[in-house]
Amino acid sequence: MHIAFAASECVPFSKTGGLADVVGALPRALAALGHKVSVYLPRYRQTKLADPQTVVRSITIPFDDKYRFCSVVTAGANTPAGVRFYFVEYPPYFDREALYGSPAGDYPDNAERFALFSRAVIEASKVLGVPHVFHCHDWQSALVPVMLRTIYAEDPAFRDVATVFTIHNMGYQGLFPSDTLPLLMLPWDLLTMSKMEFFGQVNFLKGALVLSDYVTTVSKKYSQEIQTTEYGFGLEGVLRDRAATVTGILNGVDYDEWSPQTDKFTVAKYSPQDLSGKLQCKKDLLNAFGIANVDANSKVPVIGIVSRFAAQKGFDLIAQIMDRLAREEMIMVVLGSGDKPYEEMFVRMNKQFPNKIACKVAFDNAIAHKIEAGSDMFLMPSRYEPCGLNQIYSLKYGTVPVVRATGGLDDTIEPWDARTGKGTGFKFSDYTGEALLATIKQALLSYQDPSSWQTLMRNGMSRDFSWGASAREYGKIYDRARQVRASADAVAASDLKKEPVLG
Ligand code: ADP
């Protein structure tokens, strides 16, 4: 089967979060199962290509104000077998400092930017190979299924092409003023409650949820949560209406990148059989964060955080308990960037507790690896978490996750039971500072018993979340999406036959 991915980020070309890890790894796992995979991405300023070759010289994208002309290039050498990467090139939109916005906020022309990208993907596929399935991800490529079922509905090239849409985060929907529709040459009748209208605005994500043949999200638990008011961000009804074609497939992780035995960013390697290298990684981490008295402090448990600084990630809870947590014997190292108030909060905490809390405000992959390897525990108290990757990396590094039981965090972490020696981490349910503090204290107490702590570490290290099983599940969903499309075609054809003959 030929599957074409359309997404806004992908490791190693562009990244702001977990979406990039998924789009970097899943196509390779699908190719290993024998599928042909094309991946379409925007070519940003940060996209480094070894040997770019133009494969489509000019694609005309009509907008209401004027035509825009973009091209498509390939990555050149060094791409994994069975996967072709294509980059939509339109420098006025993508040759910018960042992917989605500046510190002042989202780029004001994001609707145009990602509409151009989506339409270019459809047009380019006519030249580079129409796939059996378009697999689109998050609001930035949500217009692919919308366009296929509206402006391209009569195009015979796409009549049988199925669409699968994966939600990586319901919190980002692509909301724009209603007059965006005519600007993008999309029909006004999309602006109805049953299609893309959302409180007077146009909602890209909603369009994909309504018009794709199959909808997936990145864990079983999250696929249920987003059908409730608490987690649905106003789209829970849309998802409930099509519950029969909504499912959750847990993300895998790429152990070529994230393994303590081969990690290229750490000073020492270690394995479940020989954990000794972890202590060297811990000392290196403390050094990197400027913690004094490294040798003495290496006996103190280190709690690591690597995160986007966003409300979703539970930083308000950390703020509530910080003063009390600082009285415990522990060190916290934090790497993150994003919302200014959270950045400032950690910088303030560092001033207040210089020997307890250290923070780097940055997006830095090498430091992220050092934290996974050098910490004893990894903290993710998320308000919601579609899948979460860091807790899965942490398991492999023997860095015990302390998480809130939501979405993928709940699906991947089993609670530790010291009596039976079973479990992989610590989790709490109530979204309160008290529940978080109690759970961290429980973890700190467990750390005091080295032999049972090592059992806990090894339990996590032995878990396998590689992509193979999830890729096979996606294969089944592509088949089902094609069945859904075939039956929609059959209904459309019989409706045509039923039309009354006039005259
Ligand atoms: P989300 O996609 O919501 O940000 P995930 O846990 O699914 O959360 O994925 C986050 C990914 O981004 C992980 O690979 C993580 O290591 C990486 N990451 C997040 N923040 C940073 C940062 N400040 N520096 C380096 N990597 C980061």
Image: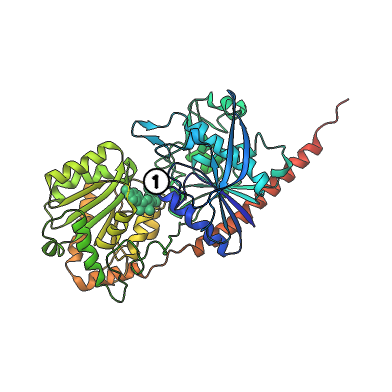
Q: Is residue 110 visible?
A: yes
Indicate the quadrant containing the C terminus: top left, top right, bottom left or bottom right. top right
Q: Residues within 10 Å of mark 1 (few under 14, many from 20)?
A: some
Residue at the outermost bottom position: 273
Q: Nearer the viewer, residue 126 or 499?
A: 126
Indicate the quadrant containing the N terminus: top left, top right, bottom left or bottom right. bottom right
Q: Secondary structure at mark 1?
A: loop
Q: Position of residue 232 (x, y in %)?
A: 44, 41
Q: In this figure, which colouring scheme has been used for the structure?
A: rainbow
In the image: residue 429, left or right of residue 501: left
Q: Position of residue 281 (x, y in %)?
A: 24, 64
Q: Position of residue 107 (x, y in %)?
A: 42, 31
Q: Quadrant of residue 409?
A: bottom left
Q: Which residue is mark 1?
A: 16
Q: Quadrant of residue 186?
A: top right
Question: CB of residue at label 1: within 8 Å of ligand 1?
Answer: yes
Q: Is residue 211 visible?
A: no
Query: Of the residues shown, which amino acid type is indicated by label 1?
Result: Thr
From this view, report whether residue 106 is shown above or below residue 336. Answer: above
Q: Nearer the viewer, residue 404 or 230?
A: 404
Q: Position of residue 140 (x, y in %)?
A: 50, 40
From this view, report whether residue 99 is shown above or below residue 443. Answer: above
Residue at the outermost right position: 503
In the image: residue 104, left or right of residue 197: left
